[in-house]
Image: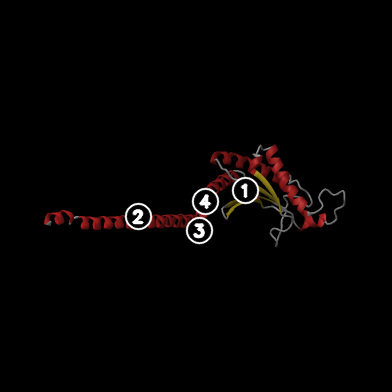
């Protein structure tokens, strides 16, 4: 009788052990499910945080500043080379002004007599200067392998406006907006036809008599950006 009891005494502890193991596996399984869900949430949160970080104003500003610096270095070199060409022609150098502003290169005519009041064509002397500028631009644009845009701005002044205030139906330009735009368009067309400048790089703008407000001048401004 004692042997029979001894042979069955292991069944109780064994059953308890199995129950404990079963409970342990259930807990482990449940824990693994919770961790997986938590991991998924953490992963999504990290993705959102990284995406937000990549588009923060601070990083965007830094990238823009870096890009502007690269562009400015190219344009600074272009400016230096054009100025070197103009030094060889003192007359041209005195009638053009080059300067950098906000990562852009500005080249503007400095003489108020570039255009006769109410006329779109520049004087013959200033035309020679503008052709020299186009030659210099074309040469160094290719050497530096620039991929920039070039805008020609046309300007008018109060003398233009006074003449155009008496415009009739037969007058070619009705106001200083049309005249300033025609001046820019004339130069763009002259550069592309005679000087063989790449037309895909060009655009034009008209500013009438409003820039600068204190002292508008009959002039052209080339902006490279």
Labels 2, 4: front one: 2
Q: Position of residue 2 (x, y in %)?
A: 12, 57
Mark number for residue 29?
A: 2
Mark number for residue 93?
A: 1
Q: Are marks 4 and 1 in contact (CB under 8 Å)?
A: no
Q: Which residue is mark 4?
A: 67
Q: Counting residues from the N terminus, which is met first, the one under dot 1 or under dot 2?
A: 2
User: How far, Cα to Cα, is label 4 from label 3?
Assistant: 17 Å
Q: Are marks 3 and 1 in contact (CB under 8 Å)?
A: no
User: How far, Cα to Cα, is label 3 from label 1?
Assistant: 45 Å
| Circle 3 crowding by C-alpha within 10 Å: few under 14, some 14–19, many from 20 | few
Query: Element under label 1?
Result: helix
The image quarter in which residue 144 lies:
top right
Q: Which residue is mark 3?
A: 56
User: How far, Cα to Cα, is label 4 from label 1?
Assistant: 30 Å
Q: Position of residue 50 (x, y in %)?
A: 46, 55
Query: Element under label 3?
Result: loop
Q: Counting residues from the N terminus, which is met first, the one under dot 3 or under dot 2?
A: 2
Q: Are marks 4 and 3 in contact (CB under 8 Å)?
A: no
Q: Looking at the image, which is closer to me, 53 or 174?
A: 53
Q: Residue at x 73, y 44 (%)?
A: 186
């Amino acid at each position: 009788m004692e042997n029979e009891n001894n042979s069955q005494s292991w069944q109780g502890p064994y059953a308890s052990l199995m129950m404990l193991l079963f409970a342990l596996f259930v807990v482990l399984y449940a824990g693994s499910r919770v961790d997986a869900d938590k991991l998924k949430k953490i992963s999504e949160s990290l993705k959102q945080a990284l995406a937000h970080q990549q588009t923060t104003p601070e990083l965007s500003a830094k990238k823009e500043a870096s890009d502007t610096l690269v562009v400015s270095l190219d344009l600074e070199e272009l400016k230096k080379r054009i100025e070197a060409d103009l030094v060889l022609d003192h007359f041209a150098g005195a009638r053009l002004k080059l300067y950098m502003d906000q990562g852009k290169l500005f080249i503007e005519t400095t003489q108020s007599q570039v255009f006769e009041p109410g006329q779109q064509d520049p004087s013959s002397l200033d035309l020679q200067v503008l052709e020299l500028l186009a030659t210099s631009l074309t040469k160094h644009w290719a050497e530096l392998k620039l991929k920039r845009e070039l805008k020609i701005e046309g300007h008018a002044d109060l003398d233009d406006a006074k003449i155009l205030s008496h415009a009739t139906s037969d007058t070619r330009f009705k106001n200083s907006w049309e005249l300033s735009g025609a001046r820019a368009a004339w130069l763009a067309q002259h550069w592309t036809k005679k000087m063989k400048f790449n037309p895909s790089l060009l655009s034009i703008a008209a500013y009438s008599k409003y820039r600068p407000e204190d002292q508008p001048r009959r002039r052209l401004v080339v902006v490279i950006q």
